[in-house]
Image (cartoon, rainbow, N blue to C red):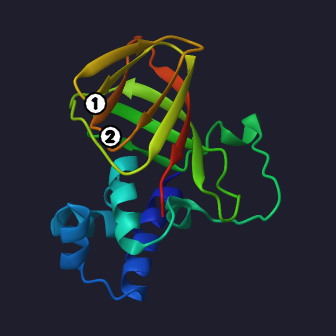
Amino acid sequence: MEKLNSAIGSKIRSLREMKNIPMEEMAQKSGLSTQYLSVIEENVQVPTIGELIKIVRVLGVRVGTVLDDFSNDGPVISRAREMQDNPVMRGKENTGAQMSYYSLSSQKQDRHMETYIVNLHMSEEKQLSSHEGEEFMYVLEGEVEVRYGKDVYVLSKGDTIYYDSIVPHLVLPRTAGGAKLLAVVYIPV
């Protein structure tokens, strides 16, 4: 698990250096501080999905370029037994939930969507986030609260939501044991 988290920061640094993007330019274009970007690149902190999207936009690559270890031209099958203890990203979203992302498509080459099983658990902070693209979520277990702009939606098992992620949003579990989602994120390149 830690190896995957470490790989994210290293790949970001490698891509930034390969593209000759100074840290200050990366900070300015992503809206993240140089200090925070350094912490990410030093593998001390894993970026949230929203932060990662901002970073890859500056780098001009897909999210998968940073997260993937494999590529495949054909169909990709994700086996449930392989996902149990192997999240691609785990970290405290500054949005108010502890999240673990299990990629369902990391081996698919040149994809335009990122697909995840997301386990949500409460944390302390509750900040809305926004990034380019669209998101679709299907509640697999528990109950979820989605704050979207000024509106609040409560979703139960089997409910879905599809929204433009440029609008500030927040996804929180409402059940004590957390919640589990199928999430599909589209990020234009």
Q: Secondary structure at mark 2?
A: loop
Nearest the viewer among 154 and 120 is 154
Residue 51 position, x and y percent, is 32, 54
**Amino acid type, residue under disc 1 in the picture:** Gly
Residue 43 shows in the view = no
Examine the image and state in which quarter residue 138 appears. top right
Contact check, label 2 and label 1, Cβ < 8 Å: yes
> Relative to residue 106, is residue 43 drawn left or right?
left
Q: Secondary structure at mark 1?
A: loop
Residue 109 sits in which quadrant? bottom right
Whole-percent x, y for residue 75 in the image: 81, 53
Total marks in image: 2
Which of the numbered marks, if any, corresponds to residue 7?
A: none
Left-right relation of 157 to 53 = right
The amino acid at mark 2 is Glu
Q: Residue at position x 40%, y 39% from top? A: 164
Q: Nearer the viewer, residue 2 or 48?
A: 48
The percent coordinates of residue 27 (x first, y second) are: 21, 69
| Residue lying at 18% horizontally and 70% vertically, measured from the top left | 28
Q: Give the crowd class for mark 2: few <14, some 14-19, many >=20 residues within 10 Å.
A: many
- Name which quarter of the figure residue 183 lies in: top right
- For the point 41% across and 65% down, the residue is 56
Q: Which residue is mark 2?
A: 93
| 34 on left or right of 136 | left
Is 107 placed above or below 186 here?
Answer: below
- Going 72% across and 42% down the picture, which residue do you hit? 82
Instruction: Judge whether residue 117 can be spotted in this image.
Output: yes
Cα gap from disc 2 to disc 1, whole angstroms: 6 Å
Q: Which residue is mark 1?
A: 96
